[in-house]
Every structure is written in structure tokens, then in C-alpha cells.
Image (tube, coloured by chain):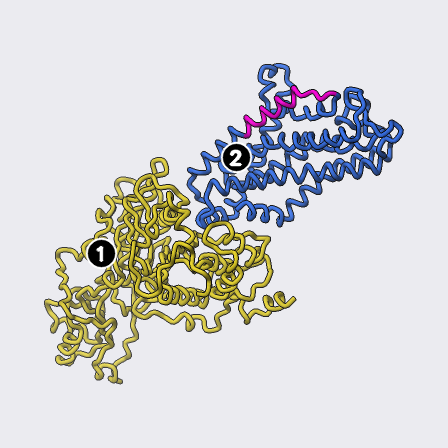
Chain colours: A blue, B yellow
Amino acid sequence: MIGVELMKMLRRPRTWVVIALIDALPTLVAFLLALTDVGPRPGTGPAFLSAVLNNGVLFPAAALAIVLPLFLPVSVAIVSGDSIAGEAQAGTLRYLLARPAGRTRLLVAKLVTVLVFVAMAVVVVVVTGYFVGTSLFGTGQLAGGNIVSVSGEPLSPHQAALRTLLAMAYVAFSMLGVAAMAVFLSTLTDSPLAAAMGALAFLVASSLLLTLDAADSIRPYLPTRYWLAFVDLFRQPILWRDIVRGVGLQSLYVAVLLGAAWANFSTKDIKS
Amino acid sequence: MTATPPPSGRVPAGPVTGPAAIRTVGLTKRYGSVTAVDGIELDVPPGDIYGFLGPNGSGKTTTVRMLLGLVLPTAGTVEVLGARIPKHARSVLHRVGALVEAPAAYGHLGARANLSIMDAAGPGGSRRTRRARIDQALEQVGLAGVGRRPVKAYSLGMRQRLGIAAALLRKPDLLILDEPTNGLDPRGIQEIRRLLLDLNASAGTTIFLSSHLLAEVEHLCKRVGVVDRGRLVLQDSLAALRAPTGSVVLRTPDPEWAVGVLDGDLRERSGDRLVVRATDPAELNARLVGHGIRITELTEQRRTLEEVVLAATTGSSDRVDAAVPPTVGPRAEVLSTDDSAWDRPPAGPPVPLPTRPARDTFSWPAGRDTPEPGPGWQPSRSEPARSEPARSEPARPEPVRPAPDDRRPGQSQPGLGSQPSRSGSAQPPDGRSQPGPGWQPSPSDSAQPPDDAEVDPGGSAADRAGSDQPEARSEESA
């Protein structure tokens, strides 16, 4: 079942278009930076971008920071929102369940597919970021190959690679909250668009509340609160506090939303 | 028939015994305050072809979905091939082929990829035999030459054929088909009908056919269940439902004489058409001819399935009439004035006999005693008039079946037994009772099932992607 769902995702042209688009934005940013050599002043703009001009090895992390706030969640919401509602809209859901695929199995297969999609998107962004970054900005030979961490201490290339891998895992994990929300909504409605938009509304609301001082008391519980904590992975030493909190918070959201999705889907009357 | 059988074992070909293919007990589904399905007790023996009839919105599709575990019943139980649904759905549903409402497929993929995905999505579809089974199913439904064209480019009929192919993929023991001939042209309908009959005869496949196309059910099914407003109002064999009514319909150019001869046996007269109480049409014919009465047409009266169903059901739920002012009268009467042919029982509580045999449910009104056919009495279906003089009489104008719709609102008596006495089975098609809104008019009179090939001899059958379709062929060779 999981294999079938993966094949279905991989054979869909839309999957690859979305990944290409996600990948296009950081690449465009890299070219603009390389052409103009004008980086954002330190402390402004997406994380790492000012450091990237000196060393392209940091560009994968910068690329993640570029796609994380909007592009990645949008694509995850589209793919996850389509998971059940898309089958319902196409009418194939009733045939899958009468086959019988099993409701829980189908839901699990859809979740795994979403996970694989997130992983693919992140990997593609990082790999492209690495090649684009190192070819446009060099590997920082002037600094002896070391990378200047966010906190100013130098990082060896080995450390930088390890931390980039950790950052990929953290960013992918951060997306699971959105994915769980979209899958849950996808079991509620027969419209994939409604499910994707609902999940995005959830994110926009969270991002908006983060900027509001009056929402200070609920801020630690907002799903996007710790998204950018992956920057802390590039500190020396790593500042684990927000990362751990982020993982815990995301786990909570994922558990609750997937539980709700499962409870709803396994007892739902399929009328599509 | 070459594929390996599913692990749980197949019912062998030929006479089949064992647990019922479908059995429901008190099956009920409520959506809030609306009761969509109300205590349905289906009983489909293995090897049967069962027609599940009812007006639009009567609960057919909800019932079908409960059989497949898609909709969960509010009360009651479902057993399919001896296993409880939805609890044991996984162990048994792979032996069931289903077409629920419209067919569905992934539009960007071709027919084979779609069938392959569906086959891989559940148990019971062996990977080794998959390709062969797909080829065979496509061959069976006449799509062998579709090639790799994506399904989104298919016509409605081709999609329907693909849906049926998906249902046939694992050589199911039970086929649950909801409107299987939707979107097919007459030739396609006949092909599918032959395919289903063949599967039933050769592999013993039980077929549960949900439809509102009466002709389709009449041509295929051995047993029928009629559902109306969520209740099963009758369930019986087609033969029993269409049993003779004990009357004979005849046409004569000498109606006055005939009335005189028949006297007390006359039940109804309209113009030259007489309905006579008689158990033996041959005897009646001899009697009339003996009196020198010429007879144009003489037929034993049988209820058509359409009449049976229209009598058993109340109306289409997709028909929404304006609220009736209380002074006008009951709803059923108001409806019958604007559509006189749509006879229905008077408004009131639904027919309180969910599963009793039809002859009990729809017996004649007390005033008209119905002679039961005696044992061994073999009625002929349609008896041609044997009175040669009447036919060869040249002086008289040929009585060209005038067939006026002689049913006027004043004449019609809304009541359960009133319809069958009006139209005999040999009545010309334009004179038979018109189906009400929501019912597809059956394209044929039941007494004379037309050959579909004659209806459409050229049979465009554009959706058949066999060798007669150059487009598909060129694509395959490409």
C-alpha cells in the first residue's frame, strides 16, 4: 500500500513541478547575490545570507531559511491536503476502500508519502543550495576552509556538514505539523483545495500571533514558534533549548492532529 | 479463468451452495433525523442475479455503500460472502468486484496503470498474475486496444467499461454493480449484459445489480428487491412478480358482441379493448370465435416489472413539489392531476410489508377476485390471436392498434391494484403506463424484449476500443 501511494506521488507531474518551484527561489537569490555582491546587512533578511557571500558552504542552510517560512509549508499543505480529499474528489477513494485498502493503512500510506515528499523537497533544496553556493561563492578558502558560525566561532567543514544534516532533519520535522493539519482537514472535506488552504490559514494565524505582543502568553504554543530555531544548530556550541522545545511542540501537534485525522477517517461515511 | 484463485477459495462453477452472498438484517442508516435506509433485509443467495430497484434517492446507493463498508450502518448487520462488514471487510471484500455510482480513475494514467494501482492497493491480487488479469479484464469489457492513452481522454462509455474491468479484475465471487450500463450505447449495454450473464453462468458469479433502469433488471435478473423511501417494499423472484393476473386483454372490431357474449366476465372496457376475467386464454378465444366474434389481439395479462415497481413505490425523492394548500386535498391526488399516468398509492404511511412476497403486498382489491392459477397451468406469455377470419377480412378497415392513452385522471383509481388491469403486456409501447419523473423509461415493452442490436444496428460503440478503433490501434503500435 505504501509502495502504491509512493508510486502514485512520484508519477504525478505535480510533485516534480512543486519541488522545482521550491528549488527555484533560493537559486534565484544566489544568482542575484552573486551578480550584485550586495548581501543583506547582518541581522536583517533571511538567516545566513550575509555570511554566504564569504563562504558558499553555508548556502544550503541559507536556502532552507529562504524556503522555510512560506514555500515549503505551502507545498506541504498542497500535497497533504490532497491526500484523502483528492482521492475523494476523484472518486477513487471509494474504490480504494472497497478494494479493500483498509482505512488505517491508507491513512498511514498517505502520511508516509507526505513524509517522503517533505524529505525529497528538503534534500533537493540543500543539494542544489550546496552546488549553487559553492560554485557561486566559493568554499571560503580565505578563512582556511572554516566557516564562521552564527555566534562567531569557527566551524570546521565537517562540523558544518553535520549541522546542515541536522538542520535538514529539523526543518523536515517542523513541516510535519503543517502536514498533520492538512491531512486532518483532508479527512474532513472532499475538497483538496479547502484542506490545503485551511492548513495555510492555520500557519498564517500562528505567524501573525507571533508578532503580536498581546499574544505573548500563548506564543510558546504556536506551531511556527520554533521553526527558525534550526539557526541555533549553527551556533558554537549548539544552542539546544529551542530546538528541543520545537521538536516537542511539533510532536504534540502531530500526535493530536493525526489522532484526530485517524479518528475521523476510520469512522467516516464515505459518500464521495 | 487462468489466474490463481484468491487465497480464501473460490466458489466453484456451477450450482453454488453455502452462505448467502449478501444478507442484511435490519440494516438502517440515519443521517441526523433523516432515515436513508430503514430496516432493509436483503437476502441474495449465491449464484443469483439480483436486481435492486428503487426511485432516485430511495436509499439504493447508501445500501450499496454499506455492503462495501464505505458507509457504516446506524443499526443492523451486513454479511457479504459469509463475513461481517465492516469488521471482516479485509478478509472478504477482495472477492467482491464493485462499481459504485460512477466509475473513477486517475486521469493522468492509462487504463493498465489504473487497474494495476487498484489491484496493488489491497489483498488478494497476486502480483505475478496481475498483468495477465489486467489484459483479460480489458479484453472482457472491450478495451483491449486502449494502449497508454490517459483516462482523462476517455469517453463516458470507455470510463464505464474501465470501471467494470476493475470490478472483474480478481474474478470476484460477487459483483456489486451500481448502474453498470450508465453512459453506454445500446450495443455496449448489450455487450455488458451478455458479459454478466456469461460470468454468472460460467463462473457462478453472484451479481447484485442496483439500478433504476427497469428494462436492464428485467432482462438480467432472476430476483428483484424494490426499495422505496429507505424500505424494502418487496423482494421476490421476477417470475413470481410477473405472474399472470388472471385476466386476458383482447381487442376486437366487434366489441359490442363480445361484451354480450362475455357478460359477467368483463372487467373493463375502453373502446375496442376489453379486459376479461379468464384463466385460459385459449378457451376464451375459442368461445369468442365460436360466436363469430373476430379477434385482433388476445393476450394473457401480466404485470410488467414497471407496473410492479410503480405500484410498490411512492415517488421520486428528486421531485420536489410546492407545498399543497390543505383545501386541495391529499398530496397524491394533487400530483396525479398534473401527471395522470404516474399512479401512486394514496398518501399515507409507507407500505407496511417490507419483505413479504409481492402477491401478498399487491393483491387485487377485494372487489376483483383474482383467480389463482391452478397447478400445472402453463400460461403462455403472449398469445397471438388465432381467429383467422378476423385477420383476413378485407372489407373491414385494419384495426391499427389505436392505443390512445385512455387513462384520464378521472378514470384512474389511485390504489395498489388498479394499474395492472389497464395495460396488458402486449399493449403497444406508446400505450403503456408512463413512468413518473425520476424513472428512466424502460426502452422496451416487457412482453417483447427488443434486440438491442436492432435498435442500433450501426452501433456506433465509439467507446469500444477494440480492433474497430483505428485511433487506439495506432497509439498502441506507436
Q: Residues within 10 Å of mark 2 (few under 14, many from 20)?
A: many
Depicted B142 relative to depicted A185: above or below: below
Badge number at residue B87: none
Q: Residue at x 74, y 22 (%)?
A: A235
- Quadrant location, the C terminus of chain B: bottom right
Can residue B319 be seen by looking at this rendering?
no
Q: Position of residue B144 (x, y in %)?
A: 53, 66
Q: Residues within 10 Å of mark 1 (few under 14, many from 20)?
A: many
Q: Farthest residue to the left: give it.
A: B264
Depicted B410 relative to depicted A158: above or below: below
Q: Residue at x 22, y 46 (%)?
A: B352
Q: Position of residue B6 (x, y in %)?
A: 42, 56
- Region of the chain picked out in magenta, as a range: A237-254
Residues B22 and B162: in front is B22
Label 2 marks which chain's residue?
Answer: A
Q: Dividing the picture into quarters, in which one does residue B379 lie?
A: bottom left
Q: Nearer the viewer, mark 2 or mark 1?
A: 2
Badge number at residue A185: 2
Amino acid tagged 1? Ala
- Quadrant location, the N terminus of chain B: bottom left
Secondary structure under badge 2?
helix
The residue that label 1 is drawn on is B358
Label 1 marks which chain's residue?
Answer: B
Q: Are marks 2 and 1 in contact (CB under 8 Å)?
A: no
- Give yes or no for residue A213 being in the magenta stretch: no
Q: Position of residue B30 (x, y in %)?
A: 34, 39
- Give yes or no for residue A253 being in the magenta stretch: yes
Amino acid tagged 2? Leu
Secondary structure under badge 1?
helix
Q: Residue at x 26, y 54 (%)?
A: B235
